[in-house]
Amino acid sequence: MIFIFGGAYQGKLDYAVENFGVKTVSDCRGGKTPDFTKDAVCSIEDFVLACVREGEDPGEFFRRRKEEWRDKVLICRDVSRGIVPVDPIMRKYREETGRLMVYLAAEADRVIRVFCGIGKREK
C-alpha cells in the first residue's frame, strides 16, 4: 500500500494519479465509506469525521479490511496542524485521524508527504 498525506489543497490526488497510475478513485468527501475496489481512496479524513460523529471506530474499520486495501493508494489530509479545536467532536476527529494515519503509515510499503505538489518519500 502507498500512503499519501499532506495539507489541504496540496495536490495529493494529482500526485497519486501522475506517479502511481491511479485511474479510479473512491472519494470519501461527505463521509462516504471507502470503496476498496478502486485504485485509490482519498479524503479518508472525511470518513473519519463521519465515524466519530456516529460513535464508530475508523481504525477498526480499516483493520478489519486490511486485505482489501493492501495494494491500494490511500490518501489523507493532515489535520494535526493549527489550533486544537474547542469542540469535543472535532478534537476527537483530529485525534482519530492522527491515530489512523499512524496505523496506515506503519502498514504502508511507502509513505509520501505532498507539499505544493511535490512528494517527499518518508518511508
Image: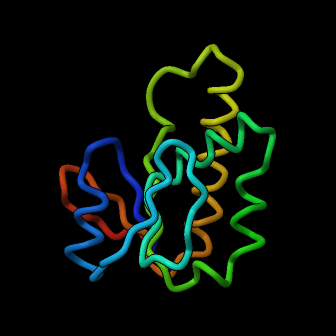
x, y percent for residue 48: 62, 46
Which residue is the extreme one toward the top? 86
Q: Position of residue 111 (x, y in %)?
A: 44, 70
Q: Which residue corresponds to the image point at 35% horizontal and 59% vertical from the top-left?
A: 113
Residue 40: % across, % down:
43, 72
Q: Residue at x 27, y 44 (%)?
A: 9
Quadrant, the C terminus:
bottom left
Question: In the displayed structure, would residue 55 be above or below residue 39?
Answer: above
Looking at the picture, tell me which residue is in the foreground, 101 or 52.
52
Which image quarter: residue 36?
bottom right
- Left or right of 122: which side holds 120? left
User: Relative to 78, does residue 16 appear above or below in the rendering?
Assistant: below
Q: Is residue 44 left or right of residue 61?
A: left
The colour mode here is rainbow
Q: How many marks?
A: 0
Q: Does residue 46 lie above or below 36 as drawn?
A: above
Q: Foreground residue, 37 or 8? A: 37
Rendered view: 34 above or below 66: above
Q: Position of residue 104 (x, y in %)?
A: 59, 66
- Residue displayed at 58% across by 78% down: 69
Q: Nearer the viewer, residue 38 or 58?
A: 38
Residue at 69 percent across and 26 percent down: it is 89
